[in-house]
Image: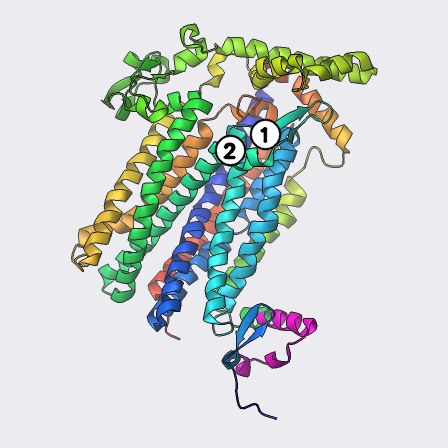
Amino acid sequence: MTTDLLQTVDWSRAQFALTAIYHWLFVPLTLGLSVLIAIMETLWYRTGDPFWRRTVQFWMRLFGVNFAIGVATGLILEFEFGTNWSNYSHFVGDIFGAPLAIEGIMAFFLESTFIAVMFFGWNKVSRGFHLTATWLTAIGANLSAWWILVANSWMQHPVGCTFNLDTVRNEMTSFWEVAFSPVAVNKFSHTVTSSFTLAALFVVGVSAWYLLRGRERRMASKSIGIAALFGLVAALVTAFTGDRSGAIVARTQPMKLAAMEALYDGREGAPLTVVGVLRPEAERTSDDEAFYFKIDLPKLLSIMSFRDAEAYVAGINDLVAGNPERGILSTQEKIDRGRVAIAQLNFYRQAKEAGDSLVMRQIQGLFDPSTPDGQNFLTQNFAYLGYGYLHSPQQIVPNVPLLFYSFRVMVGAGSLFIVLLAAVWWLNRRDRLADKRWLLWVMIACIPLSYLASQAGWIVAEVGRQPWAIQDLMPVGVAVSDLPGEAVSTTFFLFLALFTALLIAELSILLRQIKIGPKNE
Amino acid sequence: MPCIFQPKYVPIGKIVVSLDAAKTAPFNISQSNNAMNWLHNVVRFYIEGFREMTLGRTLWAIILIKLFVMFAILKLFFFRDPLAGQNDAQRSAHVMEQLTDTQTQSL
């Protein structure tokens, strides 16, 4: 790879990561808090108790701050698809564009229409209509997430499409296969329930601050009661869907799983590493040399991956060098197959330029899935197109330490949240929470920890699929636009300044509103 | 002529509006029978909502500044779409060239 291209790819990746990380600071709280507010408002609707109305209005104010600061940060990501990743956008446009368009037209408008009623409708519309608007805002926000995650899931596991040689685009053949692929369904449930957990921890943490201050005891206690139970259920579902994610990743992205576990040599009855410290990259060539120390749970990785204690889990070395006994192709073999596909694309391009319709028809036949030749070429060569752009098999290995530690931060924090939320709910129910000041501080500390865990989850998902923009089909180096690296680095720092300013604004306004507390009408 | 029975809420299309609030509102909700009135009332609903905002004004200021930075500065001066201004065939040819470029193949 030339220095210029390397610079452009790295800066574009850094810019997209920065934008996505900042965007994701705002989104999960919106997803979860909207549902919690709707639950609290339902209590107001059923009881008519003004206490609930006051409580709802307080949390709604914090929701409004987060929504207003975060709204439209996702637009920059959509710009970046066109500007920084134009080859990618063209290559997948029809498939990737459809979920994004549905997200914009259906979900975002549903959310943005009813959010106005939610904020402006107090005293102007009936309680029932207001409650409906609040629920529709919550549903709209979460539907929005569905379509974005469908698009993301397709990049992790491209299904329901066929490649059109003339338009150089993948075209959707089955909307349902794209929208309801197991990867998409599981990613949505995992992401959304983890967002619910984050929002629950936010409510629990803010309420803990009131208890520490001896203010708003009733509101804090009632909010904790609802949020802790909601968060506990959400965290348990997150753990369940996380387990399913492991099983799906083992089948669709085995290198991601191997890197997450720093598993270099595949084995039957593979253990799950609970904690460990990795050695430097140059020393990590096999399982025996990968760690300074580690604590394993025997056979658990095999069970989580294939629901079988003796199942074989492929390691990094198997996936790079291949393992014929286990039917694992070497990366070099995949590179060779991918290069055949690229060569056919090149022949087609030359034939088209020369107006040679005979050659064009022959190559079109190779891309036709309805013929035996086409099926063979598509499964044996085109399926490995992206490998053809790699110059070394080692390039398919993502950043192992980043994945290994991020995964443990996510899972460790998630486990802590389950225990914490269960304990908080139980103690609050017995009115014994306010005395435990250390626990109240832990509850506050879990707010930033929940954000860290949420970001770590995305690092696992996105860094884990490197070098692919689209799994097996397009590496990031091909997906990137032909832009000067300096231009991308300049905008990187502009975004950094803009998003940091927005984050500071959000935090200062949020903290001020929390200090003010609920208002009496 | 005043009506003896006065409901607490009246429907405006699918929205049910509180008459208590309507009394203090500068628009007459009870006349909202036709589409124009409905639209008028929806617009007034938003105007009143924006007018009554306190914290919301700060948030809207932040939103507008942010959108200005995104669309007026970043979009106009920094985001150059390499495929903009090309028709579909040209875009396809450009991407095919990128996919089959020998330099790209040596990533």
Camera-side residue of A209 and A485: A209
Q: Residues within 10 Å of mark 2 (few under 14, many from 20)?
A: some
Residue A340 seen: yes
Residue at 37% across, 72% down: A48
**Principal secondary structure, stretch drawn in magenta:** helix
Residue A39 within the magenta-colored segment of the rendering: no
Amino acid at pointer 2: Ser
Residue A294: image location, x then y, percent:
24, 22
Q: Please determine whether, in this image, residue A317 is positioned above or below residue A219.
A: above
Is A254 left or right of A219, judged from the image as shown? Answer: right
Q: Are marks 1 and 2 on the same chain?
A: yes
Quadrant for residue A173, please give it: top right
Q: Please determine whether, in this image, residue A373 is positioned above or below residue A520.
A: above
Camera-side residue of A373 and A217: A373
Q: Which residue is disc 1 drawn over?
A: A160
Q: Which residue is disc 2 drawn over?
A: A181
For the view shown, which residue lies furthest in the top direction?
A: A324
Amino acid at pointer 1: Gly
Q: Chain of mark 1?
A: A
Magenta segment boundaries in residue numbering = B22-45
Secondary structure of the residue carrying numbered label 2: loop
Residue A165: image location, x then y, percent:
71, 22
